Structures are given as structure tokens and as C-alpha cells.
Image (cartoon, grey):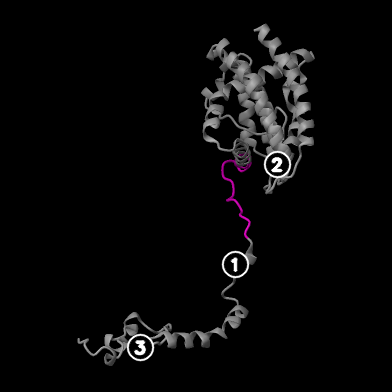
């Protein structure tokens, strides 16, 4: 376990250096995209950082996560996840209270108390077994709850998908993260590294599904992230999406000016109709009072003159 913790620390330092390099490469490759979406105006830079993150994941995080799963039994991995989840409930409680969700905040406080006291410091999730739900909240969601716009979509080095609002919430939210107060710093870095590896190990199967299902991994991850955040802000009941319609492309047929502009064409249409109609045919137009039976024309009125066909008899 001690060797694993040391390896997690070394990995954390390496990832930090690579994150700085990725940010520099992303800014250097911040080229314009032919048709960027409104929510992702920095798509060129984001795709560069996304490719960097994907490379780091394939050659560093994923192998370490697989070794983590092979080394530790499932019961230990679950206890590690429960421990970090219990620490995260502190931030969740604070943000639920900031949003005025007193019931959810109270449940979060009860979860922290029960899991810390009866779950051996959070290694066992006793609160879920007791019926207390697990909530999700952070400062980015709190800002969105009060109507602050998401801002442009961002891909952060190593950390992955985010938005301008969520990035600001991530930086400020560190103040209510209990892990940021762990001392000494070496132990804190080891804890961060272990949390990253544990979280990546839990997503191994989901990553395999993403590789098989997504044609464009970047677009898939971006859309899934934005939809998920919108879902959490509105507590599972988000408003329907708004589509951008160009009203100038749709003619208003009920506009009096449009009707007046098309009025001079009516006599020409009547003349063409008279020329094309067979001799003796009825060409009355259909009005609101005409019924389908009134429009039936007898067969002898639409037949051509028989003098042109002397051998034709009926």
C-alpha cells in the first residue's frame, strides 16, 4: 500500500507538469474551427487538449488503473471510494445549503455524521443502507442555480471537460474541500493521486463502451457533459432545448402585403387554366361553399368532339 501511495504521488507530479505543457500546446494550437458551435467557440484549443488528455489516459492513467484493480480486491476499492465520497459530501452539503435546499443539506450532514462515526471514518457507506440518498452538488452547479451562464465549454488539462463557470467554481470550491487542508503536503498529494487513480479505475468499463459507441469522442463527451450539468442544475427536470430559427427564411403567408403582391398573378393563372382545360369542361374554382359532389363533371362535358374520331362510338 505504501508503494502504491508513492507511485500515486510520482504520477501526480508528472501529470502536473504534463498539464502545463498541454495548456501551452492548446493555446498555441488555438485555431479557428470551420463551424464552431455557440457553446464551444474554443473548439480548436479544446480538441488539442482533449487529444493530449486522451494520450495521457491511454499511456499513463489507464495502465495504472488496471494495475490498481488487479492489485487490490474489490472490497478495498469500494472502501477507498466510500472514503473519498464521504469527504466530498462536505462540499455537497455546503452547496445544497447555499442553494436553499435545506432538506438535502440536512441529509448530507446526517450522511457525513453516520458514515464518519459508524462507517469507520467513511470506509463503509452506512448512510445509504439507512435510506439517506447521495446528492451531487458543487459550486459550479450553485452558480448555475442562481442563473449565471455556463460560458464557453472548456477542456482542462488532465481534469477533462468543464465550462468557464464550472472552472471558476472548481478553483473557489477547493476552500471547502477537506483534502486541501491535509498536512503535510506530501500526504495531501498522495491522497489526490490515489483519488484520481481510484476514480479512473471505476470508469474503465465505461471508457470501453465510449470507444465502441462514439464516432467522435470529443463531441460525445462535450454533449454528454453539458446535458448532465443542465440536468443536475434543474434537479432532473431541465427545460426543453431552444432551437435557433431564422424567421427570415420562412415566408408569412398571412401577411396582407404578401397577399397583395401575389394578387396580380391571379388573372394570368385563370387564363392558363382556360387554355389547358378541354373543350366543354367546367373550370369553376373551389370556394368555401363548394362540396366535393359539386365538383364532379359529367363525362360527356370533358370528352373531345367526336367529329375528329368518326370511328369512335360509345
Which disc is residue 43 wearing? 2
N-term mark: 1 or 2 = 2
Q: Residue at x 76, y 34 (%)?
A: 26
Secondary structure beneath disc 3? Answer: loop
Q: What residue range appears in magenta? A: 229-245
- Tags 3 and 1 touching, CB below 8 Å: no
Q: Report, in whole angstroms, how far the alpha carbon at label 3 lies from the one at label 1.
A: 37 Å
Q: Earlier in the sequence, mark 3 or mark 1?
A: 1
**Residue furthest left as drawn:** 314
Q: Can I make out residue 72 in this image? A: no
Dot 1 falls on a residue whose secondary structure is loop
Residue located beneath label 3 in the image = 281
Q: Nearer the viewer, residue 299 or 166?
A: 299
x, y (%) of residue 76?
57, 13
Quarter of the image for the C terminus: give it: bottom left
Looking at the image, is mark 3 or mark 2 nearer the viewer? 3
Q: Secondary structure at mark 2?
A: helix
Quadrant of the rendered structure where residue 51 is? Answer: top right
Above or below residue 280? Residue 190 is above
Give residue 177's position: percent from left, percent from top: 73, 25
- Label 1 close to label 2 by CB (< 8 Å): no
Report which residue position mark 1 lands on.
250
Q: Nearer the viewer, mark 3 or mark 1?
A: 3
**Dot 3: few (<14), some (14–19), or many (≥20) neighbours within 10 Å?**
some
| x and y, in percent, of residue 252 in the image | 59, 72
Mark pair 3, 2: CA separation? 65 Å
Q: On the rendered structure, is 259 left or right of 310?
A: right
Magenta segment includes 243: yes
Amino acid at each position: 500500500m505504501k508503494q502504491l501511495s508513492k507511485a500515486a504521488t510520482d504520477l501526480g507530479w508528472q501529470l502536473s507538469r504534463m498539464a502545463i505543457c498541454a495548456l501551452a500546446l492548446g493555446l498555441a494550437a488555438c485555431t479557428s474551427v470551420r463551424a464552431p458551435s455557440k457553446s464551444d467557440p474554443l473548439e480548436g484549443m479544446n480538441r488539442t487538449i482533449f487529444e493530449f488528455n486522451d494520450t495521457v489516459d491511454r499511456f499513463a492513467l489507464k495502465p495504472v488503473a488496471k494495475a490498481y484493480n488487479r492489485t487490490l480486491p474489490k472490497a478495498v476499492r469500494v472502501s477507498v471510494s466510500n472514503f473519498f465520497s464521504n469527504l466530498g459530501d462536505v462540499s455537497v452539503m455546503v452547496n445544497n445549503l447555499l442553494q436553499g435546499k435545506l432538506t438535502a443539506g440536512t441529509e448530507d450532514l446526517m450522511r457525513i455524521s453516520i458514515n464518519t462515526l459508524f462507517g469507520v471514518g467513511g470506509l463503509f457507506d452506512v448512510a445509504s443502507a439507512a435510506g439517506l440518498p447521495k446528492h451531487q452538488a458543487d459550486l459550479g452547479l450553485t452558480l448555475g442555480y442562481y442563473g449565471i451562464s455556463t460560458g464557453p465549454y472548456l477542456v482542462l488539462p488532465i481534469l477533462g471537460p468543464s465550462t468557464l463557470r464550472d472552472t471558476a467554481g472548481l478553483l473557489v470550491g477547493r476552500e471547502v474541500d477537506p483534502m486541501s487542508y491535509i498536512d503535510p503536503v506530501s500526504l495531501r498529494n498522495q491522497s489526490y493521486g490515489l483519488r484520481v487513480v481510484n476514480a479512473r479505475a471505476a470508469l474503465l468499463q465505461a471508457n470501453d463502451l465510449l470507444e465502441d459507441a462514439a464516432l467522435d469522442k470529443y463531441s460525445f463527451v462535450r454533449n454528454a457533459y453539458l446535458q448532465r450539468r443542465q440536468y443536475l442544475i434543474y434537479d432532473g427536470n431541465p427545460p426543453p432545448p431552444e432551437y435557433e430559427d431564422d424567421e427570415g427564411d420562412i415566408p408569412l403567408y398571412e401577411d396582407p402585403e404578401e397577399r397583395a403582391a401575389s394578387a396580380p398573378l391571379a388573372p394570368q393563372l385563370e387564363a392558363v387554366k382556360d387554355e389547358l382545360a378541354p373543350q366543354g369542361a367546367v373550370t369553376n374554382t373551389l370556394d368555401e361553399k363548394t362540396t366535393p359532389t359539386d365538383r364532379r363533371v359529367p363525362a360527356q362535358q370533358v370528352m373531345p368532339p367526336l367529329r375528329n374520331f368518326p370511328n369512335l362510338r360509345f
